[in-house]
């Protein structure tokens, strides 16, 4: 990179094209909407993170000293709800996805720009309603809202929170709808399906889950709210209903939703691995189709959350079998990413460090999912810290790292500035260490029998809890560092060229930050995905994509 | 499987726990293997193929069907071994043996109420003899709870509106944790207690030492009489307008819609609170519902009474202290009847 | 690595800036609506699941409750809705062939029929209100409390299962009615623009897309009608 | 995706078919068929009616393959929801 003189973005771009608050709040530009999302999602992440810190601090000692039971119950519930519904599900699709899907396929915008803006407003409305519920008194049902506790016994703001999630669901649906239509109808000439970057395939698969699953959780939460308000219902055993039906409906969405959370992350990892090793992804079509396979088969396994919930033994076996089957597409991805590095040219830039961290941690998180899918072992592990460790390994160690990696990788494109590389590598390391120290002990805790959602626990578990809390503090610091230097770099970072990493992807073939319509002219794609160098240009890096596209 | 020497494994004190541990170690082994394999290969590649000059472009590789097949099929086969092994233990775990001694458990925010067939009641404690099969029949008065004994590697949700069961056979005397593992409100983490496994003779001592109340079956008989069940099913459950209840438990029942179903706890319970759900062949929907008229505990007592109505041993006869037999099965436990039930 | 670029063709006034041409815009609009309808199917799917489950659990209570619905009004409403689907299809057709007056007339008819459906539904809801058949305390001050004799409740059947039916009935028809209201609103907007002469054989995608939505709402009713009103009639009752 | 204009005659006949279907399903509902036949008859008629609306009023018969795929996938996912949920309810008493 040092050999390269960056062109200064003197031209008009999407950020300086218009000024004023109004130009942001009424924008229909997918890139600006992505930034709106970025701001609001980060806000929710830090709220969720503060709750996590409260959890960890309380768990330092076996007694209830920092938080009493009612408070603690609200804290973990709100941590879960905010992290899942208001951070992780929208995180990558609504920010990086929003920014990049049109750019990567050579379109000027998403198919429905107004709906895109609407989805941000819906997200904010859902968020505000939820925040209101939290401030008014909070909610203590667990993020899973199990009936009949949530419908009859809880004294907290279940309806308001449910409403917030219900509203938020539509934002997710609209985002998914927009992506699907955009990817189908707005690819640039020459951008065939198999030339699409894998990030797009991942988002396509994610969108499928969003549109097929989210409506079910919406109606479920709505029924739950009515049930609570009007004392009637299909989930209440006191009037003939079945509380387990709620669990079926809840997990019909919420299991596939875990793939909403991880697939976009996998998409980012495919980009990072290919681009930072300057190779096309090994087995491109396998990686592409495994995303679709995960999206489809992911709908068949929700019952693995009900192994001990009085579900029929035979249904348990079906769901267990299918859960093992759905692990295979994930395995395919992991192996292909690894194989891509063979005889590659690997750089150690921050995004790549995050990507490598992802592969390791996702493997651990995914493999421990297999423990939970194995019926007899799940009977012991269900609702223990093993489950907590499993999903944090995938959601924090996996998706959050992928998100951070992606954010660093596209940061120059988004802001037109470079982040400080040294700080980036340093914080990636801190996050990795802190993360493992936080959650590795929790696997052991879980097998030892420590139940989740306990703030008071037998003294023999304390050592491991202290380790975990120590790790969380390191992790927290590790996450604060990027917050500061990324904000710093927006003003003071080195000005980024159009293509700082010298890559072939379409998003790099325009200036940084891009103009409002992304490209000056509709590009015509004549190259394959991750085609790093055409034979005749093998030696010259960057020659073919540092320039801003001009009319042929 | 002997595991006491391995760190980070909780006490292993039931016939099942060793089996679960074995599978757990297998899973851990595979996980560690793959994690090391992948991170090892990753680190090796990352070092070996680091970028040496900013202009290098590696030769593109398209992929390899052979490799793809290999690394789909092998994990699939490994995954299937996990599935089969897990399912096999699970199946065993979910089928209570017919000769198990029953204990009735009712969950309630935030405590466990336990009653032995011999009448002893306990709260948040469960005393069981080592070497005998125990079956827990569990219900709840309010929300979902979960009965979790880590040392035995078992847990099951306790769901309002129905019964769930658990069974185990303790192998080592000792005091073990009992947790509520399903979030159930404010004091969820206080809904804990212990399971005390005792040598059979200590257990007998404990039984005779603690005040024995009316046995659940006797109590159930009284409820049966006061609710007027006898008017249709006969005072001894011999059957009148309604089907005979003698020997019905654990038998196949033929239904009006042509299907048949095993009369387990859940079925008996449903027959009382929602009689129209499954009609016995040859009977009309005349039985009224008793939902709301009986508490969860009373329902369990009626259930205990109906179970006691076996063909050879009419009436609720239950020894106060089961005498261990060579097979470890208490002889006084209601023996499974082999006489076919007379149809309506 | 040669890059070439496509020029914008001379554009139609209704062409949005980010589309290449009207054809692409139309394709996106239609596809978008279909994808949206998929989400709608799943949305109703959860309720259909609950319906199926409890109908199989409490067949008698459901039959009794279902027989108490007003089959005449239900059937009339089915006919009204089918007719409105037909007029909607004709409105699209008229736009396609450029009969703009007919287009407006058919749109007005569709809206009127939609409102008629909602009116009849209102009458039915009111009947249920009078009979205290609105489940739970959905309407404060008028809790679920029907007369067991009027319901022809047989022994062994629980009133709470009858209430379960009514809860599912109100949830499903209520959701359906909400969709009708949204549909009427949507068509009113379309009507406004077609009076202004915005649609032509060249450009009529909004009419078409609104039509898709309207037909979908019709289809939901095609299933609701037999499931809620008809199954159980053969068991007698009224 | 050039557009196909369906003639009015088709619309009218579909409309009539739907009306007839409604009448038939109401009449059939009062007949006491053996077993679960009542449900089957009612649902078959509903499915036929819905199919007519989808194919003709909604023009799917003349639409791109993608639309067919979308319609099919919606039904497929409904099928998943039902089949796997009932795999629990139907087998609960089996042990
Ligand atoms: C992004 C989130 C995410 C993802 C991707 C996953 C992925 C998986 N999850 Fe996880 N899970 C959660 C989030 C997630 N999960 C959450 C939040 C909960 C708890 C919810 C709550 O109760 O609050 C949960 C709970 C949960 C349970 C229920 C536990 C219980 O409550 O009792 C189960 C049970 O089967 C399970 C299984 C799996 C499996 C099999 C996968 C698979 O998809 C994993 C596949 C990946 C791999 C297998 C790794 C890669 C493969 C290799 C390296 C090759 C080697 C492979 C083989 C030999 C097969 N998960
Ligand atoms: C996307 C999802 C997501 C993410 C990112 C996280 C992130 C974290 N989670 Fe969370 N978690 C869930 C989803 C998630 N969690 C869910 C769904 C549950 C289940 C809830 C339920 O049971 O209902 C759960 C439950 C849960 C528990 C179990 C509670 C219980 O069962 O009693 C614990 C305990 O350790 C925990 C810890 C953490 C920690 C330490 C982090 C860390 O990674 C967080 C790190 C982030 C920050 C630290 C923020 C950045 C920094 C600051 C805000 C400044 C302050 C920092 C310092 C002072 C150091 N989580
Ligand atoms: Cu009872 Cu948790
Ligand atoms: Cu899952």
Image (cartoon, coloured by chain):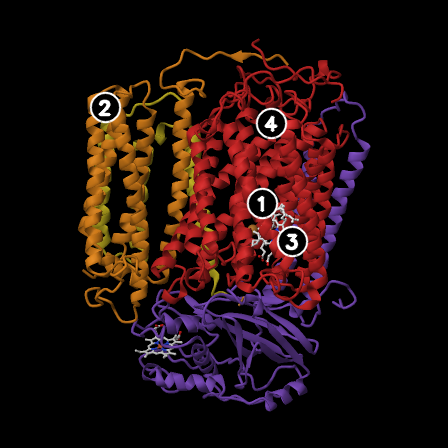
Chain colours: A red, B purple, C orange, D yellow
Is B259 placed left or right of C142 in the picture?
Answer: right
Q: Taking A47 as reference, is D71 above or below it?
A: above
Is A528 placed left or right of B165 in the picture?
Answer: right
Residue found at x 71% / y 29%: A276
Mark 2–mark 1 Cα distance, whole angstroms, equals 51 Å
Q: Position of residue B17 (x, y in %)?
A: 68, 68
Q: Taking A398 as reference, is C153 above or below it?
A: below
Q: Nearer the viewer, mark 2 or mark 1?
A: 1
The subunit letter for the residue under badge 1 reads: A
Q: Taking A121 as reference, is B137 above or below it?
A: below
- Secondary structure under tag 3 reads helix
- How many marks do you count on the picture? 4
Can you name the residue that lies furthest to the top here?
Answer: A552
Residue denoted by label 2: C195
Crowding at mark 4 (Cα within 10 Å: few <14, some 14-19, many 20+): many
The subunit letter for the residue under badge 4 reads: A
Q: Are marks 2 and 3 in contact (CB under 8 Å)?
A: no
Mark 1–mark 3 Cα distance, whole angstroms, equals 20 Å
Q: Are marks 2 and 1 in contact (CB under 8 Å)?
A: no
Residue denoted by label 3: A389
């Amino acid at each position: 990179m040092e050999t390269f003189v960056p062109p200064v973005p003197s031209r008009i771009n999407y950020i300086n094209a218009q000024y004023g608050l109004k130009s942001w709040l009424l924008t229909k530009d997918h890139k600006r909407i992505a930034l709106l999302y970025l701001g609001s999602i980060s806000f929710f992440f830090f709220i969720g993170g503060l709750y996590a810190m409260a959890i960890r601090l309380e768990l330092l000692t076996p007694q209830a000293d920092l938080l009493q039971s009612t408070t603690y119950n609200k804290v973990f519930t709100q941590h879960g709800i905010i992290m899942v519904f208001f951070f992780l599900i929208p995180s990558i699709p609504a920010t990086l996805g929003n920014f990049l899907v049109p750019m990567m396929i050579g379109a000027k915008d998403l198919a429905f720009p107004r709906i895109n803006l609407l989805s941000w407003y819906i997200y904010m409305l859902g968020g505000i309603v939820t925040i209101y519920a939290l401030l008014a008194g909070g909610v203590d049902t667990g993020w899973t809202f199990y009936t009949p506790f949530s419908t009859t016994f809880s004294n907290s703001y279940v309806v308001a929170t449910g409403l917030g999630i219900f509203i938020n669901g539509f934002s997710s649906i609209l985002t998914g709808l927009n992506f699907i239509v955009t990817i189908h109808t707005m690819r640039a000439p020459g951008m065939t399906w198999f030339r699409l970057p894998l990030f797009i395939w991942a988002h396509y698969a994610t969108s499928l889950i969003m549109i097929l699953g989210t409506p079910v959780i919406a109606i479920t939460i709505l029924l739950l709210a009515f049930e609570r308000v009007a004392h009637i219902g299909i989930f209440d055993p006191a009037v003939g209903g079945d509380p387990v039906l709620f669990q079926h409906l809840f997990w019909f969405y919420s299991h596939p939703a875990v793939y909403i959370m991880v697939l976009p992350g996998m998409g980012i990892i495919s980009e990072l691995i290919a681009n930072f090793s300057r190779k096309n992804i090994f087995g491109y079509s396998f990686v592409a189709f495994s995303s679709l396979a995960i999206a489809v088969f992911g709908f068949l396994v929700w019952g693995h959350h009900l192994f001990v919930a009085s579900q029929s033994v035979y249904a348990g076996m079906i769901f267990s079998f299918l859960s093992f089957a759905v692990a295979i597409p994930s395995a395919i991805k992991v192996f292909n990413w690894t194989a891509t590095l063979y005889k590659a040219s690997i750089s150690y830039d921050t995004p790549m460090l995050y990507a490598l961290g992802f592969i390791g941690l996702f493997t651990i998180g995914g493999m421990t999912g297999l423990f939970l899918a194995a019926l007899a072992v799940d009977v012991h592990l269900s609702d223990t810290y093993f489950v907590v460790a499993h999903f944090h390994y995938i959601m924090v160690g996996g998706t959050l790292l992928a998100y951070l990696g992606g954010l660093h990788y596209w940061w120059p494109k988004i802001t037109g500035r470079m982040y400080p590389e040294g700080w980036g590598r340093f914080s990636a390391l801190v996050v990795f260490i802190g993360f493992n120290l936080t959650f590795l002990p929790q696997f052991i805790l879980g097998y030892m029998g420590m139940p989740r959602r306990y703030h008071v626990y037998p003294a023999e578990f304390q050592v491991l809890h202290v380790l975990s809390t120590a790790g969380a503090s390191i992790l927290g610091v590790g996450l604060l560092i990027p917050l500061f230097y990324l904000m710093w770099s927006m003003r003071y970072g080195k000005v980024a060229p159009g293509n700082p990493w010298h890559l072939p992807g379409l998003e790099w073939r325009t200036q940084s930050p891009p103009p409002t319509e992304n490209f000056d002219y509709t590009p015509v794609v004549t190259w394959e995905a991750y085609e790093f160098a055409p034979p005749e240009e093998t030696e010259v890096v960057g020659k073919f994509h540092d320039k801003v596209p001009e009319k042929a | 499987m002997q595991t006491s020497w391995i760190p980070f494994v909780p006490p292993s004190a039931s016939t099942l726990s060793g089996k679960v541990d074995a599978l757990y170690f297998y899973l851990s082994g595979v996980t560690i293997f793959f994690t090391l394999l992948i991170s090892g290969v990753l680190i090796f590649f990352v070092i070996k193929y680091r970028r040496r000059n900013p202009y290098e472009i590696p030769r593109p590789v398209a992929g390899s069907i052979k490799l793809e097949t290999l690394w789909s099929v092998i994990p699939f086969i490994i995954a299937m071994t996990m599935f089969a092994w897990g399912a096999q233990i699970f199946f065993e775990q979910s089928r209570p043996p017919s000769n198990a001694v029953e204990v009735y458990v009712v969950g309630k925010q935030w405590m466990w109420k336990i009653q032995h067939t011999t009448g002893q009641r306990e709260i948040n404690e469960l005393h069981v003899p080592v070497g005998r099969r125990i079956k827990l029949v569990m219900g709840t008065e309010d929300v979902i709870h979960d009965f979790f004994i880590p040392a035995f590697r078992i847990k099951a949700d306790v769901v309002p509106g129905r019964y769930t069961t658990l069974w185990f056979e303790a192998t080592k005397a000792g005091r073990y944790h009992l947790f509520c593992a399903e979030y159930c409100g404010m004091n969820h983490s206080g809904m804990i207690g212990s399971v005390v496994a005792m040598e059979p003779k200590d257990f007998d001592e404990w039984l005779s030492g603690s005040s024995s109340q009316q046995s659940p079956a006797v109590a159930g008989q009284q409820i049966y009489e006061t609710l007027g069940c006898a008017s249709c099913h006969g005072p001894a459950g011999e059957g009148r307008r309604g089907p005979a209840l003698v020997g019905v438990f654990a038998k196949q029942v033929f239904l009006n819609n042509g299907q048949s179903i095993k009369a387990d706890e859940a079925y008996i319970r449903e027959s009382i609170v929602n009689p129209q759900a499954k009609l016995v062949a040859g009977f009309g929907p005349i039985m009224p519902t008793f939902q709301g008229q009986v508490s969860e505990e009373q329902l369990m007592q009626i259930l205990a009474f109906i179970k006691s109505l076996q063909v050879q041993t009419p009436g609720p006869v239950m020894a106060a202290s089961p005498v261990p037999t060579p097979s470890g099965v208490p002889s006084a436990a209601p023996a499974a009847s082999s006489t076919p039930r007379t149809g309506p | 690595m040669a890059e070439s670029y496509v020029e914008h063709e001379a554009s139609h006034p209704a062409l949005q800036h980010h589309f290449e041409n009207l054809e692409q815009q139309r394709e996106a609009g239609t596809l978008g609506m279909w994808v949206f309808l998929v989400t709608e199917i799943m949305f109703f799917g959860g309720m259909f699941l609950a319906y199926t489950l409890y109908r199989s659990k409490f067949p008698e209570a459901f039959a009794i409750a279902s027989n108490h619905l007003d089959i005449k009004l239900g059937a009339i409403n089915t006919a009204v809705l089918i007719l409105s689907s037909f007029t909607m299809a004709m409105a699209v057709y008229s736009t396609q062939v450029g009969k703009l007056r007919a287009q407006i007339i058919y749109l007005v008819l569709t809206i009127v029929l939609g409102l008629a459906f909602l009116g009849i539904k209102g009458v039915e809801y009111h009947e249920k209100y009078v009979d205290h058949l609105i489940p739970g305390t959905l309407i404060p001050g008028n809790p679920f409390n029907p007369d067991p004799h009027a319901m022809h409740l047989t022994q062994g059947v629980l009133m709470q299962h009858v209430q379960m039916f009514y809860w599912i009935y109100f949830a499903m028809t209520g959701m359906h009615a909400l969709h009708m209201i949204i549909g009427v609103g949507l068509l009113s907007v379309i009507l406004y623009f077609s009076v202004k002469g915005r649609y032509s054989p060249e450009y009529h995608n909004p009419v078409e897309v609104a039509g898709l939505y309207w037909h979908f709402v019709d289809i939901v009713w095609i299933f609701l009608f037999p499931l809620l009103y008809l199954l159980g009639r053969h068991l007698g009752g009224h | 995706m050039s557009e196909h204009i369906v003639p009015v005659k088709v619309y009218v006949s579909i409309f009539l078919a739907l009306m007839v279907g409604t009448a038939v399903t109401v009449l059939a509902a009062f007949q006491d068929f053996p077993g679960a036949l009542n449900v089957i008859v009612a649902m078959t008629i509903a499915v036929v009616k819905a199919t007519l609306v989808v194919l003709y009023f909604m023009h799917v018969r003349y639409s791109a393959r993608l639309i067919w795929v979308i319609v099919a996938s919606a039904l497929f996912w409904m099928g998943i929801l039902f089949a796997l949920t009932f795999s629990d309810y139907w087998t609960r008493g089996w042990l």
